[in-house]
Image (cartoon, rainbow, N blue to C red):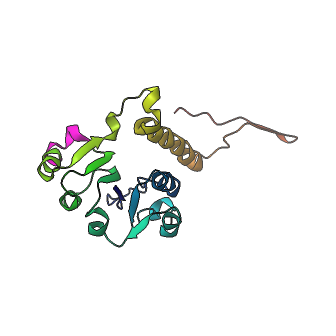
């Protein structure tokens, strides 16, 4: 069974659907993993890391998707990518189906079985696939880091022989 991980093409999207560590686990399960060249670039994963994990590197989207039984993406695929998927392929991504009904029709017309990962139940058994909690956790962490970098005062309370600096107060 072939699993494809194409590049994310949405402006500003720096995530990738699978890390080299995940690819290693998938190949150990017997899946043939195809990663589009540069898919992990913005997440600081070089193609070589995917190769070392057992993936084949495809030189383009068409090559990555043409025979894929399963497609992992972070965000919904473009119309072009949908057209490149084979009939019966399974797609797992954050699809936002309530706001993009036209795209749902395209999945149906292409025969793609689309799974909106944001609808994964937030229960213990599905916790490892809960994209909302994991991505919200990361976004919250990043928001605090970004805010701290522009905050003009010290964040922690600092006590020195010269005096005390009160801690910064923030509301998250």
Residue 75: where, in percent of width, then height?
32, 50
Magenta segment, which residues?
96-103
Answer with the quarter of the image where residue 10 lies: bottom left
Q: Is residue 84 above or below residue 98?
A: below
- Residue placed furthest toward the bottom: 59
Q: Is residue 93 left or right of residue 19?
A: left
> Picture coordinates of residue 123 (x, y %)?
43, 26
Q: Nearer the viewer, residue 151 or 134?
A: 134
Horizontal and vertical percent position of residue 88 = 20, 50
- Quadrant that contains the N terminus: bottom left
Place of residue 118 in the rendered image (x, y in percent of width and height, measured from the top left): 34, 37
Residue 37 appearing in the image: no
Query: Quick one: 54 or 165, which is closer to the camera?
Result: 54
> Magenta: predominant secondary structure element?
helix
Of all residues, the one furthest to the right in this rendering is 161
Is residue 120 shown to the viewer in this render? yes
Residue 92 located within the stretch drawn in magenta: no
Total label count? 0
Left or right of 12, for residue 139: right
Residue at 41%, 63% (x, y): give it.
39
Q: Residue at x 51, y 56 (%)?
A: 24
Q: Residue at x 26, y 67 (%)?
A: 62
What residue lies at 29% left-to-right and 66% top-to-bottom? 61
**Quadrant of the image occupied by residue 133:** top left
């Amino acid at each position: 069974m072939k699993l494809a991980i194409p590049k994310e093409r949405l402006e500003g999207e720096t995530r990738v659907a699978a890390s080299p560590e995940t690819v290693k686990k998938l190949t150990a399960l017997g899946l043939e993993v195809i990663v589009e060249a540069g898919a992990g670039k913005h997440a600081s994963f070089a193609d070589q890391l995917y190769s070392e994990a057992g993936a084949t590197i495809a030189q383009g989207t068409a090559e990555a998707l043409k025979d894929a039984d399963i497609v992992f993406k972070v965000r919904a695929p473009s119309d072009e990518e949908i057209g490149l998927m084979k009939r019966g392929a399974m797609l797992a991504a954050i699809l936002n189906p309530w706001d993009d009904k036209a795209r749902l029709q395209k999945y149906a017309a292409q025969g793609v079985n689309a799974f909106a990962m944001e609808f994964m139940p937030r229960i213990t058994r599905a916790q490892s696939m809960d994209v909302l909690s994991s991505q919200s956790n990361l976004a919250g962490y990043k928001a605090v880091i970004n805010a701290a970098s522009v905050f003009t005062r010290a964040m922690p309370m600092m006590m020195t022989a010269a005096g005390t600096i009160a801690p910064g107060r923030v509301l998250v």
